[in-house]
Image (cartoon, rainbow, N blue to C red):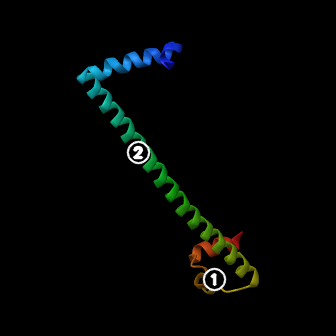
Amino acid sequence: MIAERNPQVERAVVKLRVLSSDERARDMLERREKAQRDFAMLVDDAEKRGRTEGRTEGRIEGRTEERIAVARNAIKMGMKIDAIVDLTGLSREEIESLSAR
């Protein structure tokens, strides 16, 4: 009924009937649809993996920034570099570069 009122829907219905009756065309269509679903799944998995990696990197960067802030405060307080290394887990070189700034 909708197809009778809308020429685009009517063309789609005709095309669907042709494809449904042709076994080879139906097989090709099913393969194409499967490939599209597989591709969409791969993209979805990649996006999820990217978000997870991004969150992990963000947490690591956040922790490093926090350690740097603690190290800067410790330097201002006059703490020895070895104590700051133990406190923050930053390397001696990183702390020395912070105190040089």
Q: What residue sits 33% from the left and 37% below the top? A: 34
Q: Nearer the viewer, residue 78 or 90?
A: 90
The disc at residue 64 is: none
Pick out the residue farthest to the front.
1
Q: Is residue 22 above or below residue 43?
A: above
- Say which mark, if any, is on residue 41: 2
Q: Residue furthest right?
A: 76
Which amino acid lies under the numbered mark 1 shown in the image of this protein?
Ile
Q: Is residue 86 left or right of residue 17?
A: right
Label 1 crowding class (10 Å Cα cut-off): few <14, some 14-19, many 20+? many
Instruction: Give the mark toward the camera: 1 or 2.
Output: 2
Locate residue 41: give its quadrant.
Answer: top left
| Foreground of the two, 69 or 46 | 46
Return the residue nearer the eye: 49 or 30.
30
- Check disc 2 and give the amino acid type: Met
Q: Position of residue 59 (x, y in %)?
A: 58, 66
Q: Residue at x 36, y 41 (%)?
A: 38
Count numbered badges in the picture. Answer: 2
Task: Report x, y in % for residue 55.
Answer: 55, 60
Q: CA distance from mark 1 to mark 2?
A: 47 Å
Q: Disc 1 on helix, strand or loop?
A: helix
- Which tag, 1 or 2, sits closer to the chain's start? 2
Q: As drawn, is 55 to the left or to the right of 30? A: right
The residue labelled by disc 1 is: 84
